[in-house]
Amino acid sequence: MDAAISQVFNGLSLGSILLMVSLGLAFAFGLMGVINMAHGEFIMIGAYVAYLFQSIVAPFLGGVEPGIWFLLAIPAAFLIAGLLGALMEMTLIRHLYGRPLDTLLATWGVGLILQQTARSIFGAPNVNVSSPLWLTGGFDIGAGLLLPYKRIFIIALVLVVVIALYFYLYRSASGRRLRAVMQNREMASCLGVRSRSVDAITFGLGTGLAGVAGCALALIGPIGPSLGTYYIVDAFMVVVLGGVGSLQGTVMAALLIGVSTSFLELGTTATVGKVLVLLLIIAFLQWKPSGLTVLQTR
Amino acid sequence: MTNLVTLNLRRWGPFTLLMVALLLAPLYLSDFRLIQLGKFLTFAIVAVGLDLIWGYGGMLSLGQGLFFGLGAYGFAMYLKLQSSGGKIPDFMFWSGLKELPWFWAPFSSPIFAIIASILIPALIAAILGFFVFRSRIQGVYFSIITQALTLLVSIWFVGQQAYTGGTNGITNLGSAQLFGKSLMSPEAQHGFYFATVVALILVYILCRIVVTSRFGRLLVAARDNENRLRFLGYNLVTFKVLVFALSAAIAALAGILYVPQVGIISPSSMGVVPSIEMVVWVAVGGRGTLLGAIIGALTVSFGRSFLSESYPNIWQYFMGALFIGSVLLFPKGIVGSIQHLYERWVRRSNNQEMQPSPVTTEASSPEIIVNIQPSQAKGQS
């Protein structure tokens, strides 16, 4: 019973990180049909932003302890990763429109360059971000089970992000334009939606969320230039399983993959668990080839 | 008649010249460069197989490194058993194994090792392909799934220290004996070099036959408009599974030839990064040309060895720029661009010689007919 609770908790924690990482991927894929192989590097950028805030900004804000720097690092990571992502869309991806496989290769190249840049600036060895005091320790739910505050914080952060995204997508003019372009690009353009700028904004939004995810990951592990590569394939699996372009599908897929990975890892080893998850996804696609949710186009 | 001769000359001339140059390479290259070239030629074999499914079939597999690695591991198992001389391999002993695992035992036979090293990757590709193509997964989805499989298998190989040698892989193959010669002797290395060139020639001819046959035209048709082909009554599942398995077998053959020349195989040669670099070889050389795959693999590999010897830090920037540049600026690749220039030159000189007759020149150029397909397809879907 205890084991089950802690596995569900671990699964939710993993799933929420996956969710934040894959939201951007899923929307860029739904909108433009491209997969951004450099997405993992935007996670890495977010994590290094947290590191920089700790080492440069924190001394001006009362040191590492109060943790104000970390709360500031989250929006900063969103902005920096988002702007870089929008820049990448405007300079590169836009020119490869309609050639999804080529985009995949070009973005992989961007990822290589970003990784090497990080290696030149910060060095190849991993660095550590020490989390503020109020995030150390855990919540004791009895029977010797401790839910770490960091993980709870990450789940809460993701919850806030998803709610904000829901309001953006379904309650704002900009979000409505995004959904319109996703459903029918030509018709939306005819009605005066600037699909080009929607592309750039959405792409930047997605990479910005990856940056926030990087900030969160900085709390729970060391940061290195290849940080993003550990999460990116799982994030792709979320996109494949969740289907294209719906918030619900991505949320369900991320939590499903997170929880089932943590349960399958319990019975076997970490890699065997992941192999089983991949096989389950392929089996699921036999039944529903387009994933959990299908985009309604008109 | 003369047309047929020039056509064959154009189709086979550059390839024949290249192969003659490669066969004569031991005369003008140092032993070090020859071994390097032999290694890169195994890459060229993988690239030809990848060009078959990507350039012609539109299936971008990010799992070729996996098939290459599995082939290499299979043959390395034979070499390891051979060089251990009846005892269990050293890394198994260090990991606490007392007896040879059952699945290692048959690999002491070279024939079995070679056949299994080719058939197992082909079978894995066929099974994966069957499930993936059956549910009509294509394009980016196919790439991602092959990449995920590659990642997981390479991590799994790292974890199974006792059976695969873990991170180090299978090493110390140098004392293996083949036909009474030590593996590292110059004679054996020359033998492997020639075996690689011959394998490359055979693989190239096989792929050339495939793409010029009816089968190959179906492959291109499936790339350009899969749905239309399905409406015409073709069963694309079997067809795509076959091509994917063939390319996996080609990659595995390359792996078999790679191991004895390099003397080591480790998970880092079969993971995600090598797999996607294989794609860039084809992209740089020119996809859908087969010859381009060979030229791309050799150019990028030699460029890499030159640059990483002299400037280890900028190599990765260069590689990244190569990925971006090869799709953004030179989507046709080296061979494709040369072909394009050549065809333009021929057309221009034809126009100057005889009176311009646009109808015949347009109709006689197969490229134009092919190019109509995707644009029509876009309009209809």
Image: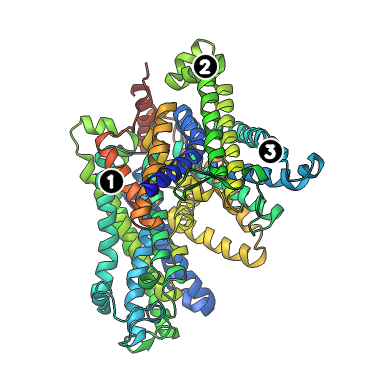
Residue B216 badge: 1
The amino acid marked with disc number 1 is Gly
Of tags 1 and 2, the one toward the viewer is 2
Which of the 4 quarters of the picture holds residue B102?
bottom left
Q: Which residue shows up at 38% across the image and 53% down it? A: A265
* Residue at numbered disc 3: A73
The amino acid marked with disc number 2 is Arg
The answer as to whether the residues below labels 3 and 1 share one chain is no
The amino acid marked with disc number 3 is Ala
Label 2 – label 3 distance at C-alpha: 29 Å
Query: Which residue reaches farthest right?
Result: A60
Tell me the colour scheme of the image: rainbow
Label 1 residue SS = helix
- In this rendering, position of residue A214 left or right of residue B101: right
Q: Which residue shows up at 46% across the image and 38% down it? A: B347
Vertical placement of residue B282 versus B199, above or below: above
